[in-house]
Every structure is written in C-alpha cells, then in structure tokens.
C-alpha cells in the first residue's frame, strides 16, 4: 500500500464518518419540520436506496453481476433478512433517542457496540476472554458510567434514561448485525448487500409509519422538509455508505473501523455548535474511554473479525 493510497482511503472513510455524523442534529431539525422518527427513518432509507441503486448499476457496467438473494443458501438469505430488520430497528431506536436526549450521550451509548460484539464472541466461544478484551470491556462500561454520572450534575447535559436505553438497544442490534455478517452472505457484493439492508429498512419503516399514523407525507410539506429528507438519505446514508465501502477496500477493515470513530466526534461537535449541547469534563473522559475501548478492540481484531459499522457484510465479501 502506497502512502498516497493510504491517505486517499483514509480521507474517504473520514468523509463517510462525517456524513453519518450529521444525522443526529439533522434529526432534530427534521422533527421541527414535521417528521416523526419512523417517517424520518423511512425517507432517509428511500433516498439512500436510490443512491445505492445507482452504484450497483454502475458496478454492473464494470462486470459485477447482480446476485439474486432468493438463490442464496437458506442460512445466508435468512441472515440477510435479519440484518435488514436489525438495521430497521437500530435506526428507529437511534432516531427516537435523538429526539429524547442529548445527541452526544446517545452516540456514546451506541458506540459501546464494539464491546458488546467482543463479549458476545466470547460467550459464543468464537474468541477468548484475554486481558485486552477485559480491559476494553472495562473501559467501555466505565465510560458509560462516567457519561451518565456527569448528566446527574446540574451543570451537565440532562440524562434522559429512555434515550440511554434506546442508544444501548441500538448498540445491541448493531451487535446482532456484526455477528451475523462475519459468516453469512459473503457472496453478495457489498454494495448490493447494503442496498438490500437499507431497502428492508425502507419498506419496514414505511409500513410502520402507516400503521402508527406517522407523517409519511412530511417531505411534501414544503421545500425545507423535502431537503432535510434528501440530505439525510444522500449525505447521511447513500454517499457515506459508498465512500465507506471504497475506503475499506483501500485501507482494510482495521484502519477503517478506527477512523469510523470520527462519526461521534462530528456528531458531538455539531450538537454543540448547532444545538448548544455541551459535555462536562467527566463526560468527555467517559466518551474518550468508550472510543478508546473501540480502538483497542479494532487494533487487536484478527483478519475478517473487524467490528465494522452497520451495512458492511464482511471483510471477505468486499
């Protein structure tokens, strides 16, 4: 790998992380414009799928065949479906949490998922509970405790217990996805798997929005809500997903996983700038511990075991 390719690949991943990082503040603006969490998830997924479809069609012109998921082995097909449903539930939990509590706190709660993945791998017998994993788990849990305790201080960001629960729940569904992705549907090109996963989220969210009386027509309320939906889907889903896939091919899963930790940094910074949310020093220390645990787990991961963000089938399938 040349220095130029390493720099270019790293830049792609940082841009992808930045795209995902805008979603927290953008969700707040979406709710003010008439969206509810489920309808926002639906329209973000719809616009995101449109971008992924263009990528798939472009890749087809370069000789990449389109894989019919119905012809996959039953285990792989079911795993792909469950991954899509996990993505749907994850997104609903995250965007509901963004509407309830501090964006910074929700993002930090979500980024405990690498520790969850490591703990589940040990429980399933896939990995050993060595000193590094014990340290990472301790850092992650201690970091969450510091973030929550900081919120109990009158001068800190108020803690909404439900927002924390939803953030941790989203981390749990991310854990399900990563665990499934390590051994299944690796024969599906990454961008196609991404398209199916986001497509399942779109269909599911639209159905839930109609069933629960969500404002499915929110984007048609004027240019502002339409623009918010388009930016969320294109800048916060389709484009960063594509950049992420190109980045991981350039620099590998471990470096990519570490650089993707730029997402909560962007989210926290934008929340402070646009929404005037600030963290106390104790919460900053807690956040650093959580992200430090994620870096530690990434650096010690074996090939094919990287704790990649949602939508990445596996290192082998890229």
Image: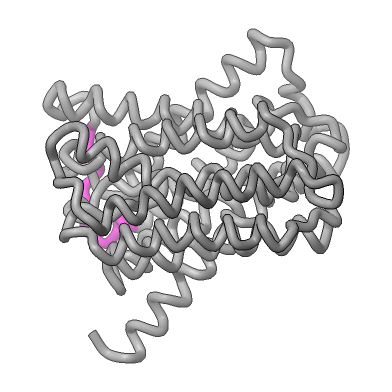
Please tell me whether residue 92 is drawn above or below residue 16 in the rendered image.
above
* Percent x, y of residue 206: 60, 21
Residue 137 visible in the picture = yes
Please tell me whether residue 27 is drawn above or below residue 64 in the rendered image.
above
Q: Give the quadrant of the C terminus.
A: bottom left
209 or 220: nearer the eye?
Answer: 209
* Percent x, y of residue 163: 66, 32
294 or 128: nearer the eye?
Answer: 128
Count of all numbered marks drawn on residues in the image: 0
Q: Give the quadrant of the N terminus.
A: bottom left
What residue is drawn where x is 29% and y is 62%?
A: 253
- What's the coloring here? one colour
Is 65 a magenta residue?
yes
Residues in magenta, as a range:
59-68
In this view, which residue lies farthest toward the bottom? 3
Please tell me whether residue 7 is drawn above or below residue 242 in the rendered image.
below
What residue is drawn where x is 80% and y is 54%?
A: 277
86 or 159: nearer the eye?
Answer: 159
What residue is drawn where x is 18% and y is 36%?
A: 184
* Percent x, y of residue 179: 26, 37
Is 186 a magenta residue?
no
297 or 273: nearer the eye?
Answer: 297
Q: Which image quadrant is residue 210 in?
A: top right
In this view, which residue lies farthest toward the top? 211
Would residue 274 appear left or right of 179 to someone viewing this image? right
What residue is drawn where x is 34% and y is 70%?
A: 255
């Amino acid at each position: 790998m040349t220095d130029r390719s390493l720099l270019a690949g790293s830049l792609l991943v940082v841009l992808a992380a930045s795209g995902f990082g805008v979603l927290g503040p953008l969700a707040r603006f979406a709710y003010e414009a008439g969206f509810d969490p489920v309808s926002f998830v639906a329209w973000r997924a719809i616009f995101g799928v449109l971008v992924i479809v263009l990528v798939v069609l472009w890749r087809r012109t370069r000789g990449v065949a389109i894989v019919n998921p119905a012809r996959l082995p039953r285990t792989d097909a079911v795993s792909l479906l469950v991954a899509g449903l996990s993505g749907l539930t994850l997104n609903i939990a995250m965007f509901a949490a963004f509407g309830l509590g501090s964006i910074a706190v929700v993002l930090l709660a979500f980024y405990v998922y690498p520790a969850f993945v490591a703990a589940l791998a040990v429980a399933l017998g896939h990995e050993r509970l060595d000193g590094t994993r014990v340290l990472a788990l301790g850092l992650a849990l201690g970091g969450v405790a510091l973030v929550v305790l900081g919120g109990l201080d009158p001068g800190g960001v108020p803690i909404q217990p439900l927002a924390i629960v939803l953030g941790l729940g989203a981390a749990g569904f991310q854990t399900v996805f990563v665990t499934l992705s390590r051994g299944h549907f690796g024969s599906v090109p990454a961008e196609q798997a991404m398209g199916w996963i986001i497509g399942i989220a779109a269909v599911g969210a639209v159905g839930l929005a109609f069933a629960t009386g969500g404002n499915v027509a929110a984007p048609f309320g004027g240019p502002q809500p339409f623009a918010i939906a388009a930016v969320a889907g294109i800048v916060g889903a389709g484009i960063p997903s594509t950049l992420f896939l190109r980045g991981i091919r350039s620099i590998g899963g471990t470096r990519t996983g570490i650089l993707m930790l730029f997402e909560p940094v962007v989210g926290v910074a934008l929340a402070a700038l646009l929404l005037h949310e600030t963290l106390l020093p104790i919460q900053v220390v807690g956040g650093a511990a959580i992200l430090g645990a994620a870096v530690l787990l990434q650096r010690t991961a074996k090939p094919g075991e990287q704790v990649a963000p949602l939508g990445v089938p596996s290192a082998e399938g890229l």
